[in-house]
Every structure is written in C-alpha cells, then in structure tokens.
Image (cartoon, rainbow, N blue to C red):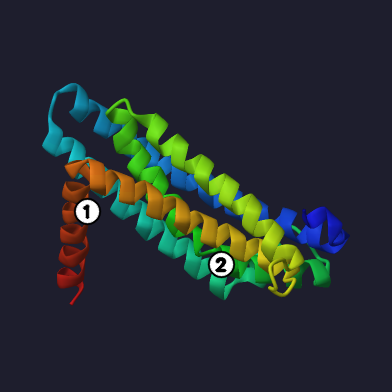
Amino acid sequence: MLGQLGEAEIAAVGVAARATFVTTIMLVGVTTGGALLTAQYWGAANRKGVRESTALTWFVSMAFAALTVVLFVFFPEQIMALTTDDAQVNKLGSDYLVITSVSMFTVACVASMLVGLRAMHKPGISTLFSGVGIVTNIFLNWVLIFGKFGLPAMGIKGAAIATVISGFIEVFFLYGYLYGKNTYLRSVLKIFVQLSTGIRSHVS
C-alpha cells in the first residue's frame, strides 16, 4: 500500500524495517533459549518448571523490548543514519521507527507465550491469532494510510500506527483466549508479576 505514496516513503519504511528486523531476530534468539529450557521441563513432566521458565522468558523479552524502545525513541535519526544519508528518508523513517517501537512489546509478549505453547505442543493457537493480527494490520493500513471512514490520510505514520494497533489486538485476543480457557496463563502471569516486583524491590 505504501507503494502508492512515493519512493521516499517506501525507502524510509524499508530502512526502518531493517532496524526492527534485527531487533526482532535478537528477541527470537532470547525466546529460543527459553524454549529449549521449557521443552526440557515439559518432557520431564515438570509443569511448575514450564510455567516458571515461560514467565522468565517473558520477563527477559520484555526487558529487551524496553531497551529497544528506548533506543528507537531517543536515537531514531542516528539509527536511520546507519543505512541512509538521505535527509527526507531519515526524517520519514525516524517518525515511523518511533511509532512502531512500541510494537516490540507485543512481539515480546507473543514470542514468549509461543515458548510455552510449543512446549505443550499447541503452536497452532499462536498461529491462529497471528493470522488475526495480520488481517487486522492489512485492514488498518488501508484505513489509516489512505484516510477511510472519515479519518485523515496519515501516510507512513498511518502504517506505523496500524502496526502498533494490530500488534496489541493480537496480544489481547491471544492472552484473552488463554486466560479464559487455560489456568496456565494465570500462573505464568503471577510468576511474571513476582519477578517484576522482586527486581523493583532490589533496585529500591
């Protein structure tokens, strides 16, 4: 859809996407390590270990996502400058990068929960809701980029906002489904909160 806006917009998204792709790959690396540990616990029928390792993977992933967001929000021009010296592309890409940086939290949430689902041999659940996120992203791109249903046409910023919203919708439905159908998520969430409060108490 961005192809209808102009060459600068296409180039800007392409350059910004490289940065988000690199961080996503690194995030997947974090969750892959967690997946190996979780699978071992599942094979040993240690359900507590599965919950704890999934929660720990989630916690580490969110911490990594937070670091990424800080870099993208406060140093977008410098990051864009690593691969382009075009001022217009840098400006457009920086705006896109700042907005989409928030989506790293949704990537961390989905990837972390996929660790537990794969260990439980239920990866199809995450795949289903990923499909929901993709369809939502396509629809919102059309609405926000071109200004449908009375909304203003936002161009590249609309694409960025669509990415963020669709990511949160995916997380909402995935976690809502798991929370409603399985006590597993409740336990993982409780452990995640304990990890977070424990870190804060040590820092303070």
Q: Nearer the viewer, residue 37 or 157?
A: 157
Residue placed under numbered mark 1 in the picture: 189
Q: Is residue 162 visible?
A: yes
Name the residue tied to disc 2: 72
- Extreme front residue here? 149
Local crowd at mark 2 within 10 Å, few (<14), some, or many (≥20)?
A: many
Query: How far apart are labels 1 and 2 at the CA level?
Result: 27 Å
In the image, taking residue 86 as reference, residue 111 lies left or right, namely left
Identify the residue at the far bottom of this view: 204
- What residue is at 45 percent from the left and 51 percent from the top? 170
Q: Is residue 13 left or right of residue 47?
A: right
Q: Element under label 1? A: helix
Rendered residue at 48%/46% (across/down): 26
Q: Quadrant of the C terminus?
A: bottom left
Which corner quadrant of the image does residue 95 belong to? Answer: bottom right
The type of residue carrying mark 1 is Leu
The residue under label 2 is which amino acid type?
Answer: Phe
Query: Residue at 12% of width from left, 30% of height from top?
Result: 46
For residue 81, say whether it is visible. Answer: no
The answer to whether 17 appears left or right of 131 in the picture is right
**Viewer-side residue, 109 vs 174:** 174
Between 204 and 133, the residue placed more toward the observer is 133
Residue 140: image location, x then y, percent:
63, 58
